[in-house]
Amino acid sequence: MTVRFNFPPTLRLRKRAEFLSLSQEGIKAHQAHFLLIYRNRADGARRFGVTVSRKVGNAVTRNRVKRIVREFCRHAVAVPPADYSIIARKGAGSLGCAALHRELEQVFGQVSQAG
């Protein structure tokens, strides 16, 4: 039996229009190295979008941050159903995996408390 650990397209925000409408209509939660924008969904689905700009670091650093964030989102079962846009801020690339997970837990904790 093969166990697949992937991040399927059904869990992702993929189009620019989805990101733009979410940023205009969504609720924002801040953390030192992350900005989370979310909008509740009625259908019970969770979708995640990850944005990491060049301010975070070079391509290797940006891809590492994206991989860690996607892995966190794949395992995030305690978050309410919504569309989420996770934006990494400057300095996120210098954090280790455990520190990134802690900050993501804190910012998603704000969402759980608010909703």
Image (spheres, grey):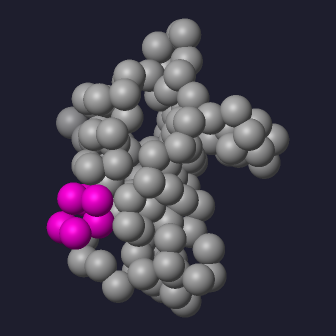
Instruction: Report x, y in % for residue 38.
Output: 54, 36
Q: Nearer the viewer, residue 68 or 86?
A: 86
Q: Residue at x 55, y 10 (%)?
A: 42
Above or below 31: residue 24: above
Instruction: Report x, y in % for residue 17.
Output: 81, 41
Numbered disc total: 0
The residue stretch that appears in magenta: 98-103
Q: Nearer the viewer, residue 59 or 103?
A: 103
Residue 46 appears in the rendering: yes
Work out which quarter of the rendered image holds the C terminus and state it.
top left
Residue 10 appears in the rendering: no
Q: Determine whether, in the image, residue 14 is placed left or right of residue 62.
A: right
Above or below 85: residue 34: below
Q: Residue at x 62, y 74 (%)?
A: 53
The question of residue 97 being in magenta is answered with no
Which residue is at the far top? 42
Instruction: Report x, y in % for residue 19.
Output: 71, 45
Work out which quarter of the rendered image holds the N terminus and state it.
top left
Q: Nearer the viewer, residue 17 or 111?
A: 111
Q: Residue at x 30, y 79 (%)?
A: 95
Instruction: Report x, y in % for residue 90.
Output: 50, 79
Task: Determine the main secondary structure of the stretch shown in magenta.
Answer: helix
Q: Determine whether, in the image, residue 109 is placed left or right of residue 24.
A: left
Which residue is at the far right? 17
Q: Residue at x 53, y 22 (%)?
A: 40
Q: Determine whether, in the image, residue 70 is placed left or right of residue 104.
A: right
Q: Determine whether, in the image, residue 91 is placed left or right of residue 84.
A: left
Q: Using the rendered view, name the quadrant where residue 102 is placed.
A: bottom left
